[in-house]
Image: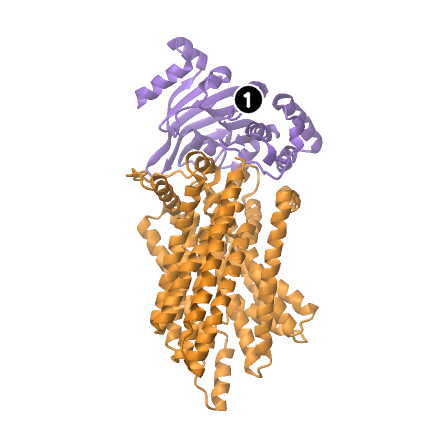
Amino acid sequence: MKPLLRLKLIILKRELFTFSAQSIVKSISFFTVITVFYTGIYAILKRIFGFLYIEEYIGPVIITRLIAMTFSSFFFFLIISNIITSIPTFFRNPEVDYLFSLPLDAKKIFASRLIENIVFASWASVIVNIPVINAYGSIYMGSYKYYAVSIVSLFLFLLTTASAGIFIIFMIFPAFLSFSRLKIAFTTIAILSLFIVVYLSMKFNILFRVPDITTMQGVLDYINSIELPAFRHLPSEFFAQTMKASVKPGFAWIRPLGAMALYCLAGFVLLGLSSLRYQKLFLTIPAVSGNTSKKTKGFPAIKGRIFRSARILAYKDLLVFFREPTQWGQSLILVLLLIIYILGIINSSFNVRLPVFMTFISFANIAFVSYLMVTISVRFTYPAISLEGNSFWLMRTYTDLKTFLAIKYFIGLIPILLTGIMLVSLGNYFLKTGKLIALIGIINIFLFSWAITGINIGIGGMVPNFKEKNPSRLSAGAGGIIAAVVSLFYLIFSLLVMNQWAFDYFRTTFFFGGKVNFLLLAACQSVVLLLTAVFAITFPLLALRSLKKINL
Amino acid sequence: MLAIKDLKKYYGKVRAVDGVNIEIPEKSIFAFIGPNGAGKTTTIKILATLLLPDEGEVKIGGIDLVKEPKKIKKLIGYIPDTPFLYEKLTGREFLQFVSELFYIDRKTFKRRLSYLDDYLAFGDWIDNLVESYSHGMKQRVAIASSLIHDPYLLLIDEPMVGLDPLSAKRVKDLFKDFATGGKIVFLSTHTLSLAEDIADMVGVINRGKLIYRGNPEELTSRKRENLEEIFLKMIAEQT
């Protein structure tokens, strides 16, 4: 293990500390974006926690519930993230092929891949979790003990989720490869259903089902009902409990932390079982070159001359996308997100019937949907240019780069545009929103999808990594994070602009009376349109300039 | 001795390797030739312990490949058709890494590197990062990595890819010298002139079946044609 570990450390050191003008610019932009992101999340959470903290009885309970809910979501996301990254990390990888040809024990290879998998699958989540820990510690004036215990908990949490994800993939991946398409479809539906059942059993929205309380007993009953952990046996719940206990004096944190350690231990058992199967699985599944006996229909003859090269490129992209197993996992997450989101909308609309509340949710829905669009775009659109890999020379030689980028743009745009409009329309339908608000929702989602795609294609083209073949690694890399954060900045700014009109709309429609200010609406919408045009055009143009300069 | 008996490997309904029998004595260079998709790479991957055969038996130096893969790994040096190298290491560091895995002490490493440098002529490039290497330099480092531990059997898929004529000549000399020391070189190639130049034995594979094995000189003198013409005829006949 020692030579392998030493090798990885040398590589890591060189990746981090090889200085060139380009790498310094990249690092500075990356750290700036991360710092701004971290500060933003921290400030927002501190404000929310601070606001709740002063609410006697109910505030602290809601804070703990919010944290538990956040960690529960992370629990599932981290498992899925580990599942996605583990296929190319453990199996479809030329380095693994090479290592297996050396006199190395399979368990040692497994251990080295495990560390790599945990880092790739979890680092983005850690960036989001740290401000949660800091904001909570800052409100409750946590000591060094609090921070030390929380960091240990986070570490145990990451190990537990990684072992669960990797164990799942070691159990189902080999079976998936030998399955027929029908069996794969059935298994996928079964996994999706399982996740949905688990998710629904968590009753996340219990917090938002505020009852019409008129008595003190009612208030106490409500507090008691939300104090019950939604999913009390998950490691995420123990994580929240450890944080809660460690801000107080004494050693009450030992119990939940011990429970997390037990989970981690169970995780190690699963990892041990997985490592025992590793050699056998590696030898029985198809190698990197992907030998297959399946017959295909072949590339179709493209008829006509209109947009010919564009249509050829588009067809090639779709064909490659659906044949890449690492993309299937990503698509699974997308479907999962959409189902959960739709269920959430349907569920919430039955609990709150006041028009003002419904309209408010409808506005919030635009923000949530656009956030989902960013997630999808970073996962699928951002890696699109890098995934051309060695075949990028072909694009440079035989096609016009503008056409190439345009195709990537539209392939990225159409799914998020359709998904966004579908979600907003469904939301408005269930919320019974008025026509004006519904129209504004659709217009803005339409605009957002162009800008988000532009940002992701643009940054993907500005910092392409033609050597990385794994889309999930690309989107979890520095460029992917920058694309996500820039997209979020654009969204926040646009929503703040639209908020000027929304505030006026709420004031006149629901509280003080008066006419809807269409002039203000036109002004706000024009600013968003302008902003969208800037982001949607500038980033792809920068990508075009950058791609033209690449030495192949 | 490398002994392959009735080796079979299937991918679904496709017979990638279909009953291959080969015996290669020590001090030999065996050239495995055949069209694309004939089963060459699959056979080499089985010999490199990267794939399990479905049927058949492989013994390297008398050791069974399926039963004792760990022992086999110590006996082989393997270079795939697209060799893997760590881009953020220098050539020397990469070779040191490999030698560490084979428990080679630094003194022996220096001696082996010096021997390989005589043939492969790394020059100062050996201390540059792999990411700055040309295709040929990467190939030379890959070849060195497979020989640094002085294996018993060298498995190499398309050895001359990216090499200039001088480097190619040196690599051929290296292989000959290596085999002379009581070892075996098992190479797969499309370059028939290479097989003609250095191989003591050739095996022609098509659609997973070994359709010829023997001495290339014997074959060319018997048929009074060069290896390329014979190869093309063999493939055409079988097709």
Is the residue B222 above or below the residue A284 in the image? above
Outermost residue toward the front in this view: A519
Q: How is the image coloured?
A: by chain
**Residue A531 in view of the camera:** yes
Relative horizontal placement of residue B231, taking residue B134 as reference (left or right): left
Counting from the top left corner in percent of width and height, residue A530 is at 47, 58
**Which color was chain A given?**
orange
Nearer-the-camera pick, A269 or B154: B154
Residue type beneath disc 1: Asp
- For image coordinates 49% across by 65% down, the residue present is A73
Outermost residue toward the right in this view: B107
Is the residue B35 above or below the residue B73 in the image? above
Tally of numbered tags: 1
Asked which secondary structure carries label 1, the reply is loop
Badge 1: residue crowd in 10 Å (few <14, some 14–19, many ≥20): few
**Which color was chain B given?**
purple
**Residue B51 in view of the camera:** no
Outermost residue toward the bottom in this view: A215
Quadrant of image for the N terminus of chain A = top right
* Label 1 sits on residue: B164
Nearer-the-camera pick, A70 or B218: A70
Is the residue A518 above or below the residue A12 in the image? below
Counting from the top left corner in percent of width and height, residue A330 is at 43, 53
Relative horizontal placement of residue A297, taking residue B23 as reference (left or right): left
- For image coordinates 53% across by 59% down, the residue present is A267
Counting from the top left corner in percent of width and height, residue A25 is at 62, 48
Is the residue A274 above or below the residue A59 in the image? above
Nearer-the-camera pick, A84 or A552: A552
- For image coordinates 54% across by 44% down, the residue present is A106
Indicate the chain on which mark 1 is placed: B
Relative horizontal placement of residue A438, taking residue B1 as reference (left or right): left
